[in-house]
Amino acid sequence: MDYTKLDASLALAVDDASGDPDVRRLAVIVRLAAPASGPQAERLRSAGIDTREAGERTVLTGVLSVSDVESLSGQPWVVSLSLSARRHPL
């Protein structure tokens, strides 16, 4: 896993994750170097990220497993991965 691409909260969540590493439970923001090409979009879809409406976006979200985070962090076209925070009304 390339920890340099993970923010501190995601790195902590990955390290603290227990149980099956293939269970999707981490809400993650994925930042790409460029809009996803066909094979890249397919890889993102297999990780649980909806790319149907992605178009030219380079910031995508999805619920990933620890295994997905590990795999995506090793891709050169992924710039960073961050744990998505829950938003609460003010």
Image (cartoon, helix red, strand yellow):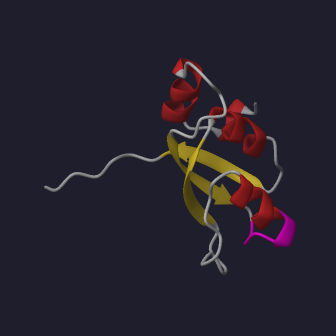
- Where, quadrant-wise, is the C terminus in this rendering? bottom left
Residue sitting at x 33%, y 47%: 86
Picture coordinates of residue 7, whole percent (x, y): 56, 38
Does the stretch in magenta take in 3? no
Residue 3: which quarter of the image? top right
The answer to which of 67 and 76 lies nearer the viewer is: 67
Count of numbered labels shown in the rendering: 0
The answer to which of 37 and 4 lies nearer the viewer is: 37
Residue sitting at x 64%, y 76%: 52
Residue sitting at x 86%, y 65%: 39
Picture coordinates of residue 25, whole percent (x, y): 51, 38
Tell me the chief SS of the magenta region.
loop
* Relative to 39, residue 65 above or below: above
Picture coordinates of residue 16, whole percent (x, y): 52, 19
In the displayed image of the protein, which residue is found farthest to the left? Answer: 90
**Residue interval drawn in magenta:** 34-39
The answer to which of 62 and 77 lies nearer the viewer is: 62
Judge left or right: residue 59 versus residue 88. right
- Where, quadrant-wise, is the N terminus in this rendering? top right
The answer to which of 79 and 44 lies nearer the viewer is: 44
Judge left or right: residue 83 versus residue 42. left
Judge left or right: residue 88 versus residue 17. left
Residue sitting at x 83%, y 51%: 76
